[in-house]
Image: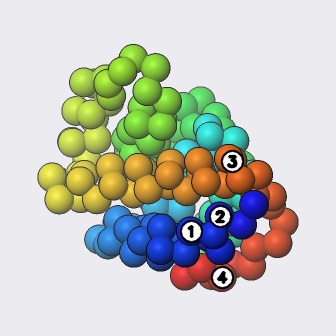
Amino acid sequence: MDWSAHAPEVYKAMLRLDAAARKGLDPTLLELVKIRASQLNRCALCVDMHSKDALAAGESVERIVQLSAWEESGHFYTEQELAALALTEAVTVLTEGFVPDAVYARAAEHFDEPALAQLIAAITVINAWNRFGVTCRLGPGHYRPGQHA
């Protein structure tokens, strides 16, 4: 189902929310976070979209491919990126009911409060996009880099 056509006001609000959540965040970091959350949520459309956007922005294939095993492939990422990826997993997969204190503290070491708030917002927004994609069975393969920029 093309949910954006049937709920255009919600779609427009999501676009505004997405734009607001991106402000002040490093675009490379943001794409890594979006790809990882999309992998965890099994949103093929979003994995496709954000991988293509990351590649178009100069991200390496190697770093994108290693995201599914980022903890074992930590040498490919900065400490800030590792903290953001840990937070992404904790927010996306809330198995404990809360983000673990250690994960939050690690993120807080690498992001000041305004940047951390933006990062949490960006993670939350990509999770919402993923749920639309998975629920409406939106498939990969048709996205062009920058199409929704």
What's the residue at 56%, 68% (across, down)?
A: 7
94 over 13 or under it: above or below: above
Amino acid carrying label 4: it is Gln
Q: Nearer the viewer, residue 52 or 122?
A: 122
Number of the label disc, if any, that sits on residue 7: 1
**Residue at the limit of the structure toward the front, as seen here:** 6
Label pair 4/2, CB-CB below 8 angstroms: no
Give the quarter of the image for residue 100.
top left
Identify the residue at horizontal 59%, vertical 30% (top origin): 72
Residue occupied by mark 2: 3
Image quadrant containing the N terminus: bottom right
Which mark is first along the chain, 2 or 4? 2
Mark 4, secondary structure of its residue: loop
Look at mark 4 in the image and give the residue it sits on: 147
Disc 3 is placed on an element classified as: helix
Q: CA distance from mark 4 to mark 2?
A: 18 Å
Question: Would you name the residue on which mark 3 appears?
Answer: 134
Q: Amino acid at mark 2?
A: Trp
User: As shown in the figure, which amino acid type bears the numbered disc 3?
Assistant: Val
**Nearer to us: label 2 or label 3:** 2
Please name whichever residue, 100 or 95, is drawn nearer the observer in this view of the structure: 95
Q: Nearer the viewer, residue 22 or 60?
A: 22
User: Between 81 and 78, which is closer to the camera in this rendering?
Assistant: 81
Q: Secondary structure at mark 2?
A: helix
Residue type at the position of mark 1: Ala
